[in-house]
Amino acid sequence: MSGAVDDTSFFTLLAPLRASLALVWRVPRARMGLLLLGAFTLLALIGPLFLGDPDALVARPLQPPSWAHWLGTSGQGQDVLAQTIMGTRRSLAIGFGVGVAVVVLGALIGIVAATVSGVVDTALSSLTQIVLVLPGLPLAIVIAAYLPSGPLTVVLVLVLTGWAWNARVVRSQALTLRSRDFVAAARVAGDSPWAIMTTAILPNLSSLLFSQLVGSVTYAIGAEVGLGFLGLGDVSVVTWGTNLYWATNDGALLTGAWWTFVPSGLCIALVGYALVLLSSGLDEVSNPRLRSHAPFVRFVTAGGGVVGQATPVVRRGGR
Amino acid sequence: MSGLRFLARRLAFYGATAAVAIVINFVLPRLMPGDPATALVARFRGRLAPETLASLRAAFGASDAPLAEQFLRWLGDILRGDLGVSLSAYPLPVVDVIAGALPWTIFLAGTSLVTSFVCGTLLGIHAAWFRGGVVDRLLPGVLTLWGSFPYFWVAMLLLYVLGFQWGLFPLGYATSEGQPVEFSFAFAVDVIRHAALPIATIVLASLGGWMIAMRNVMVTVLGTEMVTLARAKGLSTRRIMFAYAARNALVPQVTGFGMALGFVVGGSLLTEVVFAYPGQGYLLVQAVRAQDYPLLQGIFLVLTLAVLTANFFVDVLVVWLDPRTPEAR
């Protein structure tokens, strides 16, 4: 890890991020996750251009998949394929938006709590602990029930209930950074708390924040789908969650219309799986002990070695 | 700091958290745009008794009394166990409506949480001990993929395939129609048949997380000198595995159990909705659809208190597992 960074330009802040991305790309799992995510992002960006209006009533309701409608029609007679792809766009947008907001809010609260100690720290830490222990989904539902329904409400509610875990981790990480020599040096040199935050602490948190982003997007997509499924988003706005809401509302399970709920659920799972792959790939980069034994044996027998990779840890003493 | 003092501090923290939940319930209706109190009162005028309307007005901030007085009255009501009157189940009090559904949720969430924790932890121990073995190589990937599906979607799929297509399990509710609630074999079988799919859903979805967490901590513990020493002493494999390695790896796992409680409650609420299982989640959705705000707030409060209580038991368990002071951990 580098010490204090003199130049605070945007690119300097991103440098550790780029380095860790390159490291992550070498882990097969993480690469697969990134590729899968990329594919879905592409689908979300350009998919809707090739399809008609997802809200249009195009055929008789609950028709099974056919050449005209590849994934059949919904209980209202809309094209399920168009709805799934439009849902991809909206759900990913909400997921990434909320994920970024949650990471930023968590980092802000965590770093402020760690650098400005005293009463501020006590207040922020207690708030973090309390939000962490309150059951998230019921809290989100209660808040959402009072707000006008819509995607903005969902975003607001998910950010409000989701930041605490990140803040807690960032705070403890920032606290250990604060006791390092280079931060002490910056303080002795007379840097302002703001300068210490942005030049000494933030750059060293970038890889942690990146891995938090992955976790937060996972959380956001799952929670958005959950709230949508309960009908708490605007049920007329197509997302993966509202697709599932309408599927149950129109009795898909009891009429055997599997095509109304399988596509959206599979997409959610694939995106979730991609994010989990990415995050476990990140873990593997930072904690080599977690690597299973088999890759190490392959690594040794192949006589290979990649410069810059961490030393694999050997299992001790057989079983 | 001794274990008891630690527990006392935790208890104070949970008290503060409960207070925050109560304040959230008080503040929300008063913060929100559009004055829900007036809308609510207007919607139910003519259908509710005048005294109920008056108490609704008071509970949702349409009263003219100063805020402090409103809050004290509200707090007094809650401490006396009065959460108001449910609008969707009028004229039943909220407390009675919730109490009727609570046993089902505790049964469902409790059984699935404990089952998945125990099975996942045992699998994690196995995977860490036989690192690179069949379980270690196959299960984490499979369970992670499975865990990526939303709880309630897995529930829908299981219900569709096992319930609708194959007819192996009932399509919803906690008991069959006409089945009396009694201490009998028939009743127990009926309850288990209805709970099997919801429990399977939650267990399968959360098993992977427990397994991977336990495996990872256990791998670290197995690398410590304590375990090497235990081997050198010639202790039996079983003793090293459980009394030395697993026992120590269990502490973060149990702490994680407390953290996961809120999350599991959320997942079990959504699962209940799919199976029309008459617990808090099903009630919550009914309350949202009927805009039954008193019931909604009551459920939030009761779930929060339940999670806090469970968290406290987890703290007791942690102190018992690892009597060292929290600073030394």
Image (cartoon, rainbow, N blue to C red):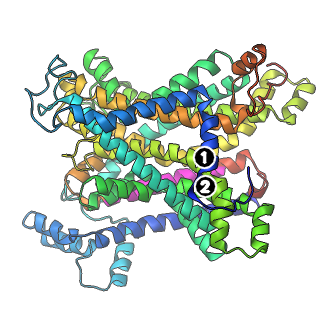
* Image height of B57 relative to A54, above or below: below
For residue B173, say whether it is visible: no
For residue B94, say whether it is visible: yes
Q: Quadrant of residue A40?
A: top left
Query: Where in the figure is residue B38, as x and y percent of width and height?
Result: 17, 72
Helix, strand or loop status at disc 2 = helix
* Residue at the image point whose x is 11% and y is 68% from the top: B42
Amino acid type shown at disc 1: Leu
Identify the subunit bearing mark 2: A
**Observer-nearest of A76 and B227:** A76
Q: Main secondary structure of the magenta part?
A: helix
Determine whether, in the image, residue B6 is placed left or right of residue A76.
right
Q: Quadrant of the C terminus of chain A?
A: top right
**Observer-nearest of A194 and B229:** A194
Q: Was residue B302 drawn as part of the magenta stretch in this picture?
A: yes
Q: Quadrant of residue B154?
A: top left
Give the extent of the magenta segment.
B297-316
Query: Where in the figure is residue B302, as x and y percent of width and height?
Result: 40, 56
* Residue at the image point whose x is 59% and y is 51% from the top: A14
Residue receiving disc 1: A17
* Image height of A27 relative to A96, above or below: above
Q: CA distance from mark 2 to mark 1?
A: 8 Å
Query: Where in the figure is residue A155, as x and y percent of width and height?
Result: 35, 54
- Count of numbered circles on the image: 2
Mark number for residue A13? 2
Q: Was residue A38 drawn as part of the magenta stretch in this picture?
A: no
* Image height of A7 relative to A271, above or below: below
**Observer-nearest of A220 and B27:** A220
